[in-house]
Amino acid sequence: MKKLTLKDVAKELGVSTATISNAFNRPDQLSAAKRTEILEACKKIGYTGPNRAAQILRKGQSNIVALVLADSLDYMVTDPVASTFIQGVSRVLRENQKHLLLYAGDSESIADVVDFVDGFICYGAPRNAALSEQLNQQSKPVVTVDFNLEGRPAINIDNEKASYEIAKAALKPGDHVAILGLRLIDSPSTCRIYDNPLLNVESSITHRRLDGYSEALKEAGITVDSDWIWSLPENNVVYAVQAAKEVLYSQPRPNVILCMSDIIALELLQCALSMGIDVPGELKITGFDGIEEASRTRPYLSTVCQSSVEKGMQAANLLLSGENQSMSLSYELKLGETIG
Amino acid sequence: MKKLTLKDVAKELGVSTATISNAFNRPDQLSAAKRTEILEACKKIGYTGPNRAAQILRKGQSNIVALVLADSLDYMVTDPVASTFIQGVSRVLRENQKHLLLYAGDSESIADVVDFVDGFICYGAPRNAALSEQLNQQSKPVVTVDFNLEGRPAINIDNEKASYEIAKAALKPGDHVAILGLRLIDSPSTCRIYDNPLLNVESSITHRRLDGYSEALKEAGITVDSDWIWSLPENNVVYAVQAAKEVLYSQPRPNVILCMSDIIALELLQCALSMGIDVPGELKITGFDGIEEASRTRPYLSTVCQSSVEKGMQAANLLLSGENQSMSLSYELKLGETIG
DNA sequence: TTAAAAAGCTAAATCGTTTAACTTTTTTGA
DNA sequence: TCAAAAAAGTTAAACGATTTAGCTTTTTAA
């Protein structure tokens, strides 16, 4: 009761294996009559088509696309922004009969998949920096999102401009400002930057956002000392709560806090409210991303809205198209009640 | 500048291909000295190890596990329960150096992956019923979660018992009860059941839950007419809102509503509150799943808590172990403020 | 000292296709 | 009617590994 192979079928029908293969893959290589005859015979004897594993080896194509997420899947799958992105990617892949392999950005190496996947979509700078290197070395197509890899097409919004604009909208000269950032330094816990060297991921969006903030701050004549800048190791509630408490209990308390994600901003907001702080009266807050929840709070969040679904779709389309053209997506400033 | 193959390396080092292969895969087949010599030489000339595509064909093993989700990935990835489940699965796969391929349960067929994946984890009854059939026909291992496939190991909680208990806790004789269920009938939109035949997925958890409710209702001497049972096609906010409105505007309005998921229950709750209905005074609500958000509302939800992460981990472990033993996980009744 | 056992390695078959190159048959056009 | 072109099939060589059986050589045991 072994599984049938192309060879078995060929013998059975008295034609060559090439013809069977062509019947499935290249209809123009044989007469229509013969083709339907073969396909029907296959159905009758229970041959469901060429073995995919063999096809992968022979064709060098698997229809599998690896989505390299910045962190462990563990976390990424539950992050609203990331999972919405995955949603966009999966939609386009589905339409094109491709499959989605989830790959953790903190993995040791891509060696165990690079031989068979058709390409990579890389969402955010991989936590394991060696992966970026490997991704760039190998020859399969790569599309990056929210960070850059030299010579590879990237999908981005203009993070610097967006950050500048949201900060500018929130700031007045004389404000005391703090920044809650993401992975700015290489620390496993939430902490102030102080003298720590910034992570050397110049291409990452968090640096772009920091640049944007800085520009707006400069225009308002405000300086932010590096101990008023926090770096969270991951964009999740636990670190966000921790950072929120630290910053809100710091003296003197800032009256404007710029957050690099809505997750952070929302926890900060909740924390502030529970401490009886008046938002935006005593404290203005800005977020980033525009997740759904951000518009459901009272006061609702000021943030930069970007469509993660669209990002995902564009990334997948770009990968499948094979073009090497980067793309800047639009965003929308949402000036909410947290900046008054 | 072609990629190196095992053959190239063998020629280069003057040994047979078998020896190189053994150096990578079966250290006991050659002397330790030769092995390190070979591995170092490989590193030097830039051979990164056996080609995975070829290995997949030859070994019949890919280290890829397909996770068949009930619906389209599009939706499943953003569902809190499903994504938490994925989290659990991915954690265990990661530990075992396996990879995760996401597969949509509304796909036409599994033919395009069955040849190369090592096994399937099937989360919920696939929307395309033919998939269940195909999954059962093929010979690779399958683990089912939240539904059953004859002869295949399953991971479940005792849905009937849990539903019975939560319903029993909410009900008093004389109550007017409605049920908001999931995929009980085959309709693309939210609707009452009326005389529609129940979907013939006897194995599905929604039927188990209905049975549990029924038992509790019987004990309380209450009958629920089939037009007080709704069926939502998918567990999402849009359908939930729709169902919530329908049921709350129905006359006479029920004073107990049993919901088969927290998503549904939460929308119902919000809808009720915004209509000025007193919960639990005028209306009691129960959910199912125990998602995080359910404990953050005021009043907070009565529900059945089950750990999706654990489900995912157990499912993956079961698949990898190769055992054929089903498993019943524990759950916890959380009697919240929505039943007073 | 020698037979038996173990270790180390090689040659060849295999996994199940695809596809370039070739042969044979049919069609076309002048 | 016939050469040239097009169509329909076939052959056989890849694709890049793994693995079994067998052959040397070395080690062990008596």
Image (cartoon, coloured by chain):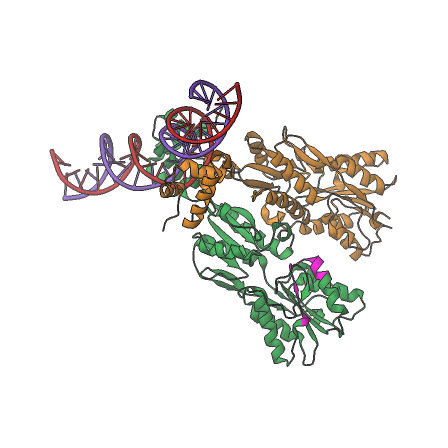
Chain colours: A orange, B green, C red, D purple
Q: Quadrant of the C terminus of chain B?
A: bottom right
**Relative height, residue A56 to residue A40 (above, below):** above
Q: Is residue A52 left or right of residue B21?
A: right
The answer to whether residue A1 of the structure is visible from this angle is yes
Q: Residue at x 53, y 63 (%)?
A: B156
**Residue A282 location (% of width, % of height):** 85, 50
Q: Is residue B330 left or right of residue A330?
A: left
Q: Nearer the viewer, residue B205 or B99?
A: B205
**Relative height, residue A289 to residue B127 (above, below):** above
Q: Nearer the viewer, residue A15 or A142?
A: A15
Where residue B278 sits, quadrant-wise, is bottom right
Instruction: Identify the magenta region.
Output: B227-241
**Residue B321 location (% of width, % of height):** 44, 54
Residue B240 shown in magenta: yes
Residue B73 shown in magenta: no
Where residue A211 sits, quadrant-wise, is top right
**Residue A313 location (% of width, % of height):** 66, 42
Q: Residue at x 42, y 35 (%)?
A: A18
Q: Nearer the viewer, residue A187 or A15?
A: A15
Where residue A96 sits, quadrant-wise, is top right
**Relative height, residue B8 to residue B179 (above, below):** above
The answer to whether residue B340 of the structure is visible from this angle is no
Q: How many marks?
A: 0
**Residue A68 location (% of width, % of height):** 59, 40
